[in-house]
Image (cartoon, helix red, strand yellow):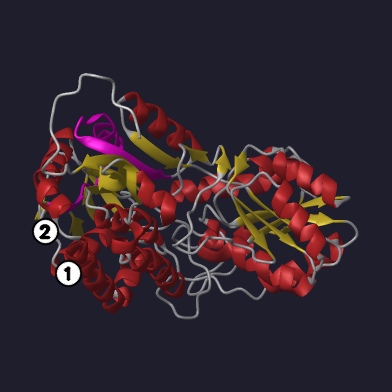
Amino acid sequence: MKSVQHWINGALADGDPARAAELFNPATGEVSGHVALASAADVDAAVAAASAAFPAWRDASLTKRAGVLFRFRELMYAHRDELAALISAEHGKVHSDALGEVARGLEVVEFACGIPHLLKGGFSEGVSTRVDSYSIRQPLGVVAGITPFNFPAMVPMWMFPVAIACGNTFVLKPSERDPSASLLMARLWQQAGLPDGVFNVVQGDKVSVDRLLEHADVRAVSFVGSTPIASYVYATGTAHGKRVQALGGAKNHMLVLPDADLDLVADSAVSAGFGSAGERCMAISVVLAVDPIGDELVAKIVERVAKLTVGPGDDPRSEMGPLVTAAHRDKVASYLDLGVEEGAKLVVDGRETPVLGGGKAAETPGFWLGPTVLDHVPVGSRTHTEEIFGPVLSIVRVRSYEEGLEVINGGAYGNGTAVFTNDGGAARRFQNEVEVGMVGINVPIPVPMAFYSFGGWKSSLFGDTHVHGTEGVHFYTRGKVVTSRWLDPSHGGVNLGFPTNG
């Protein structure tokens, strides 16, 4: 069985031998190894290494930093299959999906390679007599990232490439459910020439999270996870004087207008609802079908779901894998009966889905639940409003665009949304009126490119800045304005008057 350790100051570290957790293969339910759980002392060691490495890395030239990032990008690309295999083994997602995750993360690395341009400031000559002013952005110091199980490579890459490019040092606390990807990325950073201590990894649970949030030398914390934990991270981190960007949960709606191409809609709903077994904060979990297209759309969705192949992530025939843990599978499956109790119609029961190499999902060893479709889900029901975070697609019937918009804007979350229509005026109206941070027009998963920033509104974000893009650069740096005067050698004399411009 494998043993997953910490990475501190350029080397593997065992940490506290009394603290460890089991790792599982989600496809079989069997224990596959153990992961160290950091103590407060282990976190302190990682932060100390990052603090010691910061002055030299801060002072490294932008060209040197960019060079390390370019080499890291090439190494990550060369090892993408190995990284995807680690993700599939511990998370359960199929290999192609894991490769896609790595590719999207690398887009942020490529964006960060442009750091010499991204950190350019402004300059004003002659703001007063022989006085110039200019702005610069400087790194914060030690920063931390706390990342979720659903994207063990991509979400960390939303954070650390930009942070490190800006001159900070980084401590990553990945999910203890699928931690191996973090160590491969740490080794590739080292091979790329990143100085020891600039990138560190502490595996762990709430003990390590709390220590990072409280540690005086950690200047900023980035987090992605559920809304309750995001709220806790934001409140605790800011109470200890840190910058915090905490991205929370989601309940993403797709509004389908009667003029939409229903084949495109059905393809998009199935892809966005069941990719990565629905364990995506940008998954479409609710389809708002505007009358009269509901019945036809549901029929098309059911037809496509019936053709999906569910199986282990390392089987090339598989299109959807298992869920990450037994407890999470059971929680997601509980919504099937709840939905029926609330008045919905269970048109596809994922517990009955056949699994490659096994029987029905509910009877096969491993953490299985197939694609599920609930129709006529009541607005405001728990099934409609709560983040299920699994392969459950809810169909809500609405009578008009206005009613659909009201449903979306009335929700607690504001992460992502989509509208499907062939009416440009309706689409433009939707993007203006919807109270959501990321909007797709005939695009089901509107995750922005790396040069734009990712993040939602309302209970999907705690803090003022989104991740990566320009907002990411600003989060990991602070502005400074310098006003300078180089006097003419003939000038001199004392003047006690208040300085004025002129």
Residue 476 seen from this side: no
Q: Quickly name the residue at label 2.
A: 195
- Quadrant (top left, top right, bottom left, bottom right) of the N terminus: bottom left
Q: Quadrant of residue 299?
A: bottom right
Q: Residues within 10 Å of mark 2 (few under 14, many from 20)?
A: some
Question: Viewer-proximal residue, 406 or 321?
Answer: 406
Residue 499 percent coordinates (x, y): 29, 26
- Queried whether the magenta region covers residue 364, the answer comes back as no
- Queried whether the magenta region covers residue 218, the answer comes back as yes
Question: Viewer-proximal residue, 493 or 234?
Answer: 493
Q: How many marks overall?
A: 2
Going by the numbered disc 2, the residue's amino acid type is: Pro
**Viewed as shown, does residue 174 lie left or right of 226?**
left
Residue 92 seen from this side: yes
The stretch in magenta equals 197-224
Q: Residue at x 17, y 69 (%)?
A: 192
In the rendered structure, find residue 481 and report the number of the disc placed on it: none
Going by the numbered disc 1, the residue's amino acid type is: Ala
Residue 256 percent coordinates (x, y): 78, 60
In the rendered structure, find residue 192 and report the number of the disc placed on it: 1
> In the figure, 178 relative to 141: above or below?
below
Q: Residue at x 55, y 54 (%)?
A: 390
Circle 1 sits in a helix, a strand or a loop, which is it? loop
